[in-house]
Image: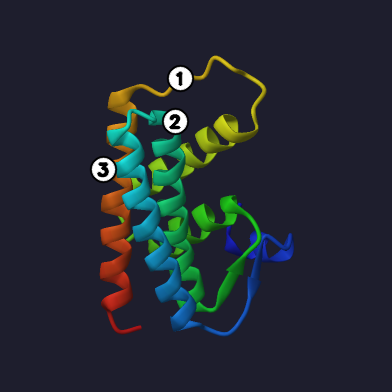
Amino acid sequence: MNIEQCLEQGLLAKTKPDPEKAKSSIEMAQHKLRLAEAEFGHRLFESATISAYTAMFHSGRALLFRDGFKERSHFAVYIYTSEKYSNKIERKYLSELNSLRLQRHDLMYGLEKNIEVQESDADTTIKMAEGFLQAIQKILQEKK
């Protein structure tokens, strides 16, 4: 799937660029990252993973707001950032965004009770979210 297909299927919608929403989305990403770190400190690795993913989601969403798009799907945020910014965001962050999107879905909505997030995995996830957020903040500071 690509951006055009996301638009056709209603997973993305064009709108006017909104720097204020982009800023608010970055602030939410920062909040979710701090929350993930606190949850990690309390050994709540599943919650920390979900919060770290949410930080990544809001980071990516900031680019959409800045560029004049609205997402109607977490998958669309991954598609958009991957297609539009793969030259500015390291592939490892984009891959992690998609992997965590799927893991978050399983953790939140899956029926399997035996999913356990290990401490090392949660730690890696938080570090990836930090790197992704920093990469996007750098892009947002550039002139469009």
What amino acid type should be assigned to the residue bearing mark 3? Lys
State the residue lying farthest toward the right. Answer: 9
Counting from the top left corner in percent of width and height, residue 91 is at: 33, 48
Image quadrant holding the C terminus, namely: bottom left
What amino acid type should be assigned to the residue bearing mark 2? Glu
Residue at figure coordinates x 58%, y 50% from the top left: 75
What amino acid type should be assigned to the residue bearing mark 1? Glu
Asked whether residue 17 appears in the rendered view, the answer is yes
Does 107 sit above or below residue 26?
A: above
Asked whether residue 92 appears in the rendered view, the answer is no
Mark pair 1, 3: CA separation: 19 Å
Q: Which residue is identified by label 2?
A: 46
Instruction: Decide: few, some or many residues near mark 2? Use Cα within 10 Å; few <14, some 14-19, many ≥20.
Output: many
Does 16 sit above or below residue 131?
A: below
Mark pair 1, 2: CA separation: 7 Å
Left or right position of 74 against 57 = right
Residue at figure coordinates x 28%, y 35% from the top left: 41
Mark nearest the camera among 1 and 3 is 1
Residue 49 in which image quadrant: top left
Counting from the top left corner in percent of width and height, residue 28 is at: 42, 62
Q: Secondary structure at mark 3?
A: helix
State the residue lying farthest toward the front. Answer: 42
Counting from the top left corner in percent of width and height, residue 78 is at: 50, 53
Left or right position of 10 against 23 = right
Q: Which residue is identified by label 3?
A: 127
Residue at figure coordinates x 33%, y 28% from the top left: 43
Q: Which residue is identified by label 1?
A: 116
Earlier in the chain: of badge 2 and badge 3, it is 2
Which of the pair 97/106 is nearer the observer? 106
Q: Secondary structure at mark 2?
A: helix
